[in-house]
Image: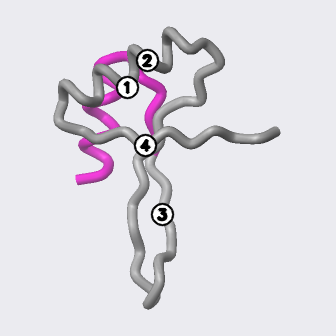
Amino acid sequence: MPSSCASRLRDFGLLAQVSEVKAGGGETWHRVQVGPYDDRRELSRAQDLMVTQGIEPLLIQLNN
């Protein structure tokens, strides 16, 4: 499922990748990440596209 979601987002021209994250209790979660985006317009476009696809985006700002 995570790889098909990332593939679908890539088909729309978004920068999407899947990573594995260890959660509490030793569970493995699959995180689909989109970006990074330097341009606010591209970020808004990506968020809008995800919402239209039934995906609830969560914005994480990286501090470099």
Question: Is 7 included in the stretch rendered in magenta?
Answer: yes
Q: Name the residue under label 3.
A: 20
**Residue type marked 1:** Gln
* Marked residue nearer the N-terminal end (2 or 3): 3
Q: Name the residue under label 1.
A: 47
- Can you give x and y, in whole percent of width and height, for residue 49 in the image? 29, 21
Q: Are marks 1 and 2 in contact (CB under 8 Å)?
A: yes
At x 22%, y 53%, the residue is 1
Q: In this view, does 41 lie to the left or right of 6?
A: right
**Residue type marked 3:** Glu
At x 18%, y 30%, the residue is 53
**Residue type marked 4:** Leu
At x 60%, y 12%, the residue is 39
- Alpha-carbon span between mark 4 and mark 3: 17 Å
The kind of secondary structure element at disc 3 is strand
| Stretch of the chain drawn in magenta | 1-17
Q: Mark 4 points at which residue?
A: 58
- The image quadrant where one finds the C terminus is top right
* Marked residue nearer the N-terminal end (1 or 3): 3
Q: How is the image coloured?
A: one colour
Kindly report which numbered mark, 4 or 3, lies closer to the viewer in this rendering.
4
* Marked residue nearer the N-terminal end (2 or 4): 2
- Can you give x and y, in whole percent of width and height, for residue 60 in the image? 56, 42
Q: Residue 44 carries which label?
A: 2
The kind of secondary structure element at disc 1 is helix
Q: Is residue 25 left or right of residue 35?
A: left
Q: Are marks 4 and 1 in contact (CB under 8 Å)?
A: no
Alpha-carbon neighbours of circle 1 within 10 Å: few (<14), some, or many (≥20)?
some
- Alpha-carbon span between mark 1 and mark 3: 22 Å
**Residue type marked 2:** Ser
Question: Is 8 included in the stretch rendered in magenta?
Answer: yes
